[in-house]
Image (spheres, rainbow, N blue to C red):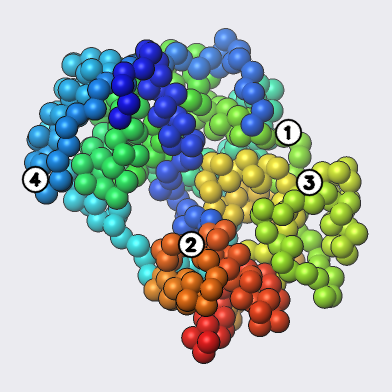
Amino acid sequence: MLSTPAPGQILRQLIAGSALVLLTACVDTPTADSAPAVAAPAPSAAVAPAPTIATPPALPTAPLAAIRFEDWRDNFRREALAGGIQPLVFDRAFAGVEPDSTVISADRSQPEFTRPVWAYLEGALAEQRVRSGQTLLKRHAELLDRIEARYGVDRQALVAIWGMESNFGQVMGNKSVIRSLATLAFEGRRPQFAHDQLLAALSILQNGDVRPERMIGSWAGAMGQTQFIPTTYLSHAVDFDSDGRRDIWDSTADALASAAHYLQASGWRRGQPWGFEVRLPQGFDYAQADMATRKSLGEWRQLGVALPASGNGLAAGEQASLLLPAGHRGPAFLVLDNFRSVLKYNNSTSYALAIGLLGERFENRGQIVGAWPRDDTPLSRSERIELQNLLAGNGFDPGSADGIIGANTRKAVRSFQQRLGWPADGYPTSELLEALRRQ
């Protein structure tokens, strides 16, 4: 840790360190695949000032095996107090806190099998969720009018996020955020991240927004109806109902406005669609299907991509990327900037696709025309690791062999597909794994 900076710098460091990415444990959230300035809030939606907390000097460390939780807690207490947390705030937050073994189990568990995207979407777009969202859009119409006017974020997207993150406030997690983050800071896989989130959580308590016993969330520390991590809360939670607290647990107004504030800061453009399903021509170069590749709608049309009527109404210069969530055999989508804004909320293309489609389902749209390759069994985690190792052994660079199909792995897959003369969609299949095994 660096020497003590000026007061208030710790919050900027924590926010930057988290990259404002939510650590979510929300309803039906998949494994991840992979900004304009924010105007000053109006008085009715003001962001409460965060306390200024200086970064304290680094404390001596020792191997975890040699440290009891009580020793770690006492060291952390000295660090937090040196940074500006009041002793009473810390002691009340940590009263009776012990490591939670279920949090460590969840942190270390890596499921062998994951659902294919079509199964994930079936759950995300369940009829009950659609009906509930439609009802809540009507019930909260006046509130959503004000949020849209203030932040410029479309209500359908907000209610879709609300539904996906916490089933419209019904499933927010039941774990103490302080206990979960303390456990992860003490012996989790990413202790520094949890450490920073824990300091931010104490800042939230010190600010008086929530009582320690009400600060509940997921095992990973995501909180409230919007499943914000503490650093994101400090940056983007708002007191939209003007009761003096930024309450994303019990205030629908604060929760939805906070999500809107986050999306606004992530570059949301009001009235722009997230994207749309398209048809690709015969002989299309599937290597163009990559989130890192952006072309104007006019350029995509020149390549033979057929847009729906809603897409043809947009300016030809709008930038979009081609998404093939199940490879070249499945549906194809052109996705715009608002899709990328949702990715900043949860860096999963499956999640962002679900948000876009769920928002449309609220308006009785959003039906997918293309067929999913349901005969394609997704690779298990061990098979994905094997795939990555084999790619590396054949001269490609998939990045770490961690079982996560990110940008580097997709690039390596695409290169191997091109060597074989296959459609280079970057989508790993069992057939591709077998071809690698034969190399």
Instruction: Kindly indicate whether the residue at mark 3 contacts the one at mark 4 (C-beta within 8 angstroms).
Output: no
The type of residue carrying mark 2 is Gly
Mark 3 residue crowding within 10 angstroms, few (<14) / some (14–19) / many (20+): some
- Which of the two discs, 4 and 3, sits closer to the camera? 4
Among numbered discs 1 and 4, the one appearing first in the sequence:
4
Identity of the residue furthest to the top in this view = 43
The spot of residue 269 in percent (x, y) is: 72, 34
Q: Local crowd at mark 2 within 10 Å, few (<14), some, or many (≥20)?
A: some
Answer few, some or many: residues within 10 Å of disc 1's Cα (few below 14, many 20 plus, some between 14 and 19). Answer: some
The x, y position of residue 234, in whole percent, is: 43, 25
Which disc number belongs to residue 219?
none
The residues bearing labels 2 and 3 have C-alpha atoms spaced at a distance of 28 Å
Residue bearing the label numbered 1 = 270
Q: Tell me which label, 2 or 4, sits earlier in the chain.
A: 4
* Mark pair 2, 4: CA separation: 33 Å
User: Distance between the Cα atoms at labels 4 and 3?
Assistant: 54 Å
Specify the label residue 66 is tagged with.
4
Q: Residue at x 38, y 13 (%)?
A: 6
Say whether disc 3 or disc 1 marks the residue closer to the N-terminus. 1
Residue 381, image x, y percentages: 41, 70
Residue type at mark 4 is Ala
Corner quadrant of residue 421 = bottom right
Mark 4 vs 3, N-terminal side = 4
Q: Amino acid at mark 1?
A: Arg
What residue type is disc 3 on? Answer: Gln
